[in-house]
Amino acid sequence: MWILSIVSTSLADAANFYRREIVFKINKPIFILFNPWCKEDSVFFDDDEWREDSVLGDVGKIWMGTSKDKHSRMWSYGQYEENVLSCAFLALDMTRLPHQRRNNPIEVCRAISAIVNSLDGDRGIVEGNWSGNYRNGINPTDWQGSTQIMQKYYKTRNSVKYGQCWVFAGVTTTILRALGIPCRTITNFNSAHDTNKNLVVDVIYNERMEIQEEISPDSIWNYHVWNECWMTRPDLPSGYGGWQLLDSTPQEISENVYRCGPVSIKAIRNGNVGLQYDTGFAFAEVNADIVSWILTRRNNGKPTFLYRDEHKIGQFISCVKPNSISNVDDDRLDITNDYKPEESAREDNDSGLRALSRSSFSESYGSSNKDVEFTLVDLVNVRLGENLAIILKMLNLTNSQRTLTISLHLYSVYYTGIRHKKIKSAQFENVPLNGRESRDISMEIQAEDYLDYIKDGCYFHMTCMAVVSETNEVFSSVDDFIISMPTINIKVEGLPLKLNKQSSIKASFVNPLKKTLRNSKWILEGPGINKPKVIASRDIPGSSLAMLEANITPRDTGNKTILVSFSSSDLNDIEGYLHVSVIQ
């Protein structure tokens, strides 16, 4: 914050050339921002469409789900809302970055990536929580945007509880856009967390196909959300400016602080992992190999190689197309090729890096016979309350009979890949498969089996293992799926809306469960329309209509977005949105 005085010099007496100074003092705080419209500024952005969206846009979408079942969450960045700009500068002050270095977007962004999370004891903005217990704060899925978080932090100077990756990323986008730095929110599906920086994610199973998380600290997130910010990079070789990865989610320490970036996207694509900052970690998030092992009695409890997957990590890297948010999910922009070449061209590009990658357990990987072809059927578009089935398809490729032992498992999981609860298992012994025969094995799942285990986002993890007795061939497969939540339907009276004129809004959805939803609340907000507002709700009986009726009064003209979400002790993460126009 600066204090500004304007000095005007006038000629009061032309004959005597007498000069008089008039001083205008401005009592309100003055904020000096980066200017992406100025060619001399290090964040200058010559793409008009992207510049407008990544600096001025106050509403966006954040992509979530799985690589096979993607969906979006609306997010209110709200950089024009009350005290948000002041909070952005407070955050910058909290980083203790000297004022004379605050003209450098590299240092500003790196400092912001650290202060958005609170893990370093620096009273950062958001406290992370992936435990499933949010009793002393707000469930991360209940946030609809950054406004409430930043206003609360500005008022209390205490970390706001709680956030997960999309919350950290949403707040970071708000701060950087408020400061004038172009920023967009990015989602990476099947994102690797490579803890030992060997470019390999080791996954260890026991003979029941249960992951042994205590042996390997690596993990694969269904999705991970970070940011990209736009700037020149005079500290790097020529050609590495432009979009830079910035990650405020506290995963690994960088120079003794939980932060990541800014990392040149071009450096990630080119495999230049030695460039600052944290390029190697970011490269692994989109390029690591998965090496799976099994602990068997036959091998004295030592890990036995199952398979290596060089393609699953880093899929469908996504953001929203500029200035194109729609009421349906047809506005996703796939930027995977910005991070890595097409699969057919990858081997030449990063073969040197892969030669350096080593599993924690072995440097040699065996191979299996392929007498039987196995396929674990994908589960997509599963709606909450529906029954489902895990199906394994088998085809004997030989003319001889094969005898199989098969195990199927279903777990509820957090989106970070950490398991929550085992829901159901099935074991099939001595299953005959005649020569050239095809056959299906299935495990039926009733809705009642999984409803009590629904966690944030409704992610599920199914695993399969099959052993061919005659050849000791081992097949294993793992897949994730998400259960779709109902969508809130929103209707507004008197469109287009009028500035400063009250209108009524109705929002509704049908409770998909047979049980009553208790401790329920609605959350309503819309930048320029309505400040974030929490509205208590009555209990919602099973299979009945839940409805919200409220009033809104637009405070600004233009194209706006209304966001509504619903949360209860039995069901959360239900949301909807509506684009509206506000006229004078």
Image: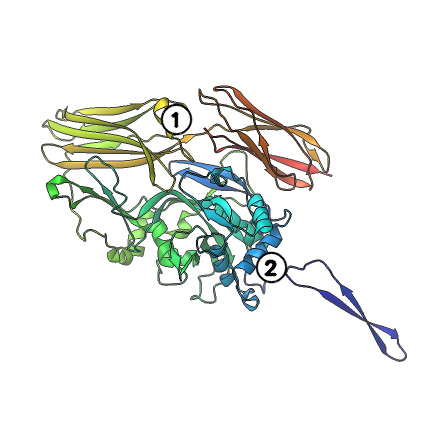
Q: Residues within 10 Å of mark 2 (few under 14, many from 20)?
A: some
Where does the image place residue 287, in percent across and percent down from the top left? 33, 50
Where does the image place residue 277, in percent across and percent down from the top left? 41, 61
Query: From what the image shows, is residue 99 above or below residue 170?
Result: below
Identity of the amino acid at label 1?
A: Leu
Using the rendered image of the protein, determine whether residue 201 is visible from the camera's viewpoint.
yes
Q: Quadrant of the C terminus?
A: top right
Query: From what the image shows, is residue 435 above or below residue 24?
Result: above
Q: Residue 461, located in which quarter of the rendered image?
A: top left
**320 sits left or right of 390 in the view:** right
| Residue occupying image coordinates x 74% and y 61% | 26
- Give the color scheme: rainbow, by chain, secondary structure or one colour: rainbow
Of the numbered discs 1 and 2, the one sitting upstream in the chain is: 2
Query: From what the image shows, is residue 572 above or below residue 364?
Result: above
Identity of the amino acid at label 2?
A: Asn
| Residue occupying image coordinates x 58% and y 50% | 156
Where does the image place residue 333, in percent across and percent down from the top left? 47, 43
| Residue occupying image coordinates x 10% and y 26% | 401
Residue under label 1: 451
Q: Residue 386, located in which quarter of the rendered image?
A: top left
Give the number of marks.
Answer: 2
416 or 266, which lies in front? 416
Q: Quadrant of the N terminus?
A: bottom right
Residue under label 2: 35
Q: Dot 2: what SS?
A: loop
| Residue occupying image coordinates x 37% and y 42% | 416
Where does the image place residue 140, in percent across and percent down from the top left? 48, 40
Query: From what the image shows, is residue 258 above or below residue 394?
Result: below
Q: Dot 1: what SS?
A: helix
> Mark 1 or mark 2, which is nearer to you?
1
